[in-house]
Amino acid sequence: MKVLLVYPKYPDTYWSFRHAMPFIGKKAAFPPLGLLTVAAMLPQSWEMRLIDLNVEPLSDADIFRADYVFVSAMTVQRESARQVLSRCRDMRVKTVAGGPLFSTCHDEFPEANHLLLGEAEETLPRFLADLDKEAPQRLYRPEGRPDLSSTPIPKWSLIDMRHYASMNIQYSRGCPFDCEFCDITQLFGHRPRTKNPEQVIAELEALYAAGWRGGVFFVDDNFIGDKGKLKKEVLPAILSWMKVRGYPFFFYTEASINLADDPQLIEMMVAAGFQEVFIGIESPEEDSLKETGKLQNYNRDLVASVHYLQRAGLQVQGGFIVGFDSDSPAIFEKQFRFIQESGIVTAMVGVLMVLRGTKLYNRLCREGRIISTCSGNNTDTALTYIPKMGPEVLIEGYQRLMRTIYSPEHFYARLMTFLKQYRLLGPSPFSMLQRRDIRAFFRSVLFLGILGKERLHYWKIFLWTLVRKPRLLPLTITLTIYGFHFRTVAEEICGSHGRDR
Ligand code: SF4
């Protein structure tokens, strides 16, 4: 059997980091972890090839050569996924589709021959058994949530790691919280399911053996869903492994804000090599947090929590949302003040997304407020629901907010706030420098320090870091490059791309 695994293209979102890639000579931020894991579950006697459309194009010959084309996609990859499926259908090559996009919207894809909903550990074996009997069904629905102890190590040999800025690993699925807009709990449930420490170490070892050094992203939606297991088993195992291997990686992940309530957990994460954490802050507006069920953020000093994490050695990336029913037009100014004060350099601000299958989607359907399908891109200004504050007010306020927070003046002011708060613990970042970092430095000097409209801000922060916190210089350069990516995305959102650069 010849199988082609295809990862569709994603648009220019915050998470694509597309505009930062040329600085480090990479093509994409992360490899397609789901497809690589699926590949490891397929019969290993099959001939397999993987094409990531974010890295290389897909030719008709590639499709023709395959007996089956497997496509895995998130919601944000909808358009590209549809194109791949249509091409395969037109060429009469059978397709198997899975992943979050198809799990929530399978009825929108008549082009697909076989749809595997839910988690592959559950549905893929049934599909393979039916295929063996030459009687595969069209639709496989999950009958439960699988235990992750049997999840194999991703088949890393299918990609060229040199194309990617970071590798990734998944330790857990599911989240104990219940935010109204979130589809994670619909897809993976409330009870966090985790891999065991031996699996995590085996995955790190596989990346190490494949020659990877540098960043590794734990893609879990909430890494601290099961704090007890992390503290007792997983973090001590990671720390021991990192010591033995000489700290070849640094880690980043996503977590809920209650991480700030647990100094021991933070200390263990930092010691194990975690440097960055993405947190869904969502809103400084208490009524909006309550409305959306973000109770872990409610009634707390969010700025103080962020500063605490920064001082403890974790850089905080933040997710922010505008467009809740409780948001008044004053929300844009409140978000701006919060973001600046917190020193969250990479603030991913989006319009409320109404994803199918979420409690929010069901409520807005009942209220007759859904107008179209959500693209999965939170910077998309084509509204899919009727907001209480009025569509024009929302979009105009959102664009204004984006223009402001990523203007050089405010971006660099925020970066300075962060650098003053942040305490870098662990090995010197200079010891981990690679050729790509040197290249990124020279490119940042050229494109931001000489040609960029932010050049005065760039040199000011560069010199400040050099004199006051020289250990942070590599991070400062990285963040100025991220700033360029986010500003370019912001300009695209505001329709002013390239106008004043
Ligand atoms: S904390 Fe994050 S992952 Fe968990 S339900 Fe809320 S938005 Fe989803």
Image: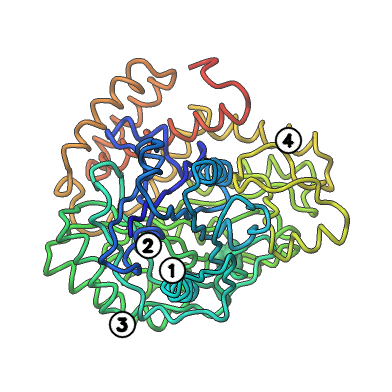
Q: Kindly identify the amino acid type of the residue bearing the numbered disc 4.
A: Ile
Residue named by callout 1: 223
- Measured from the top left, where is residue 455 in percent x and y? 38, 20
Q: Quadrant of residue 54?
A: top left
Residue named by callout 4: 395
The first of marks 2 and 1 along the sequence is: 2
Task: Name the mark on residue 233.
Answer: 3
The first of marks 1 and 4 along the sequence is: 1
Pick out the residue farthest to the right.
Answer: 367
Q: Are marks 2 and 1 in contact (CB under 8 Å)?
A: yes
The first of marks 3 and 1 along the sequence is: 1
Q: CA distance from mark 3 to mark 1?
A: 14 Å
- Measured from the top left, where is residue 388 in percent x and y? 84, 48
Q: CA distance from mark 3 to mark 2?
A: 16 Å
Q: Kindly identify the amino acid type of the residue bearing the numbered disc 3.
A: Glu
Residue named by callout 2: 218
Helix, strand or loop status at disc 3:
helix
Comparing labels 3 and 2, the label whose residue is closer to the camera: 2
Q: Quadrant of residue 247?
A: bottom left
Helix, strand or loop status at disc 1:
loop
Helix, strand or loop status at disc 4:
helix
Q: Residues within 10 Å of mark 2 (few under 14, many from 20)?
A: many
Residue for point 81% across, 57% down: 364
Q: Is residue 500 above or below residue 52?
A: above
The first of marks 2 and 4 along the sequence is: 2
The first of marks 3 and 2 along the sequence is: 2
Ligand 1 under 8 Å from disc 1 Cβ: no
